């Protein structure tokens, strides 16, 4: 048997005690790092909040109302309602955010008509619907929905008659809503056809 020219390394055949000592040392390093970290993180968060308050001259902005818990004026029976889309913006210029939600029945198939609702929340009260921009009774589908610069915009897809299949709307209208005075004023773009080649 030939002997190795390398020196005998006692720690190459590590025993459980060796691994236990290594694990304990690593745990100590992690614990010390954890104790040092939160103080710096807290200082950064406080500085960030102060910077936001300084830039806007007040405390950080209020949270927008969550449409998930709102019961919308939409009769879906046992199917229930679903919020298909939502966006946040200050629509009335009071500095507080409103949420605009596109809501429809939670149908298992097909494309049920949608409604567009404005949701607000004041103080500690529950969120509530304050305006209906599109009533689901109009049997429209909503696409290209957005809230920008205090305006709500959407493309509304509809049907020229009851004979048009519900899968294939053949009318298109672009609409914008803006708060003026004490109500939402609608401006609609030219209605058109969605039919190809029409």
Image (cartoon, grey):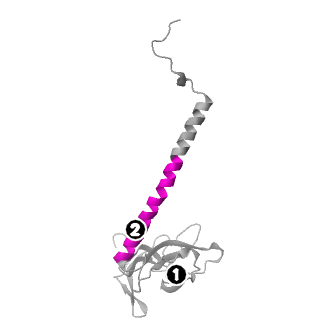
**Rendered residue at 51%/78% (across/down):** 65
* Magenta segment includes 193: no
Which picture quadrant has residue 150? bottom left
**Rendered residue at 50%/17% (across/down):** 8
Mark 1–mark 2 distance (CA, rounded to whole Å): 47 Å
Label 1, on which residue? 136
* Magenta segment includes 51: yes
Label 2, on which residue? 47
Question: In which quadrant will I find the C terminus?
Answer: bottom left
- Mark 2: which secondary structure? helix
**Rendered residue at 55%/44% (across/down):** 27
Q: Is residue 139 left or right of residue 198?
A: right
Q: Which of marks 1 and 2 is in front?
A: 2
Residue 194 seen in the figure: no
Q: Give the range drawn in magenta.
A: 30-55
User: Looking at the image, is mark 1 or mark 2 earlier in the sequence?
Assistant: 2
Location of residue 23 in the rendering, given as x and y in whole percent from the top left corner: 57, 39
The relative height of residue 97 versus residue 41 in the rendered view (above or below) is below
Location of residue 120 in the rendering, given as x and y in whole percent from the top left corner: 50, 83
**Magenta span: chief secondary structure:** helix
Q: Which of 126 and 77 is in front in this view?
A: 126
Q: In this view, does 105 lie to the left or right of 185?
A: right
Q: Is residue 59 left or right of residue 130?
A: left
């Amino acid at each position: 048997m030939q002997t190795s020219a390398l020196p005998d390394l006692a720690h190459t055949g590590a025993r459980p005690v060796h691994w236990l000592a290594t694990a304990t040392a690593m745990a100590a390093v992690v614990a010390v790092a954890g104790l040092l970290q939160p103080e710096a993180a807290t200082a950064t968060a406080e500085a960030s909040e102060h910077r936001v308050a300084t830039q806007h001259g007040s405390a950080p902005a209020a949270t927008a109302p969550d449409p998930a818990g709102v019961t919308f004026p939409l009769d879906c029976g046992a199917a229930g309602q679903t919020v298909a889309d939502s966006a946040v913006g200050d629509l009335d210029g009071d500095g507080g955010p409103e949420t605009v939600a596109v809501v429809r029945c939670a149908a298992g198939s097909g494309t049920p008509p949608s409604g567009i609702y404005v949701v607000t929340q004041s103080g500690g009260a529950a969120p509530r619907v304050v305006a209906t921009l599109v009533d689901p009774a109009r049997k429209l589908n909503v696409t290209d929905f957005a809230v920008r610069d205090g305006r709500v915009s959407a493309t509304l897809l509809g049907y020229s008659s009851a004979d048009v299949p519900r899968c294939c709307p053949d009318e298109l209208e672009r609409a914008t809503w803006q708060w003026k005075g004490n109500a939402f004023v609608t401006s609609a773009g030219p209605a058109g056809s969605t039919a190809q080649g029409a």
